[in-house]
Image: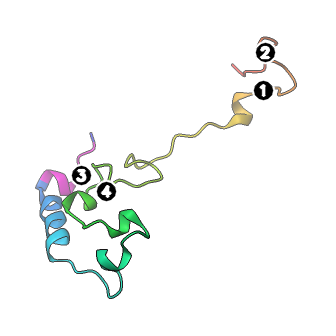
Amino acid sequence: TRSTVGTVSRVSNVLRMLYSRAGTYPAGRTPEDLAGTFPRDAAPLDSDSFSPNTAVGACPTCSGLGRLHTVDEAALVGDDSLSIREGAIAA
């Protein structure tokens, strides 16, 4: 499961609400200052912005999964001079 101490104890919900309600924007970085430049940065932050379980708060690299699933082409293709029918894909 994806449960963490924060989700089991529900403290992460409180922290997300705290960050979204009590936080302030740095000088020159308010939504009005950034309007039209960086749409995501200019959007008002809400509690979803701090949750790894939402599209907005998830890591853009791993989509909130915590790991990357990649393919090693060298391990997949045994001999790149062969076609697939000729057995290029390693077993």
Q: What residue does disc 4 label?
A: 57
* Res 78 label: 1
Disc 1/disc 4 C-alpha distance (Å): 39 Å
Point out the tag, 1 or 3, that comes first from the N-terminus.
3
Q: How crowded is mark 3: few (under 14 residues within 10 Å), some or many (20 or more)?
A: few
From this view, report whether residue 49 is shown above or below residue 25: above
Disc 1/disc 2 C-alpha distance (Å): 8 Å
Disc 1 secondary structure class? loop
| Residue 34 place in picture, x, y as percent | 37, 75
Q: What stretch is highlighted in magenta?
A: 2-8
Disc 4 secondary structure class? loop
Side (left or right) of 18 relative to 34: left
Q: What residue type is labelled 4?
A: Gly
Choose between 18 and 42: the one closer to the eye. 42
Point out the tag, 3 or 4, that comes first from the N-terminus.
3
Q: What residue does disc 3 label?
A: 4
From this view, report whether residue 62 is shown above or below residue 16: above
Point out the tag, 1 or 2, that comes first from the N-terminus.
1
Disc 3/disc 4 C-alpha distance (Å): 16 Å
| Residue 41 place in picture, x, y as percent | 36, 68
Disc 3/disc 2 C-alpha distance (Å): 45 Å
Point out the tag, 1 or 4, that comes first from the N-terminus.
4
Side (left or right) of 56 relative to 6: right
Marks 1 and 2 close (CB-CB < 8 Å): yes
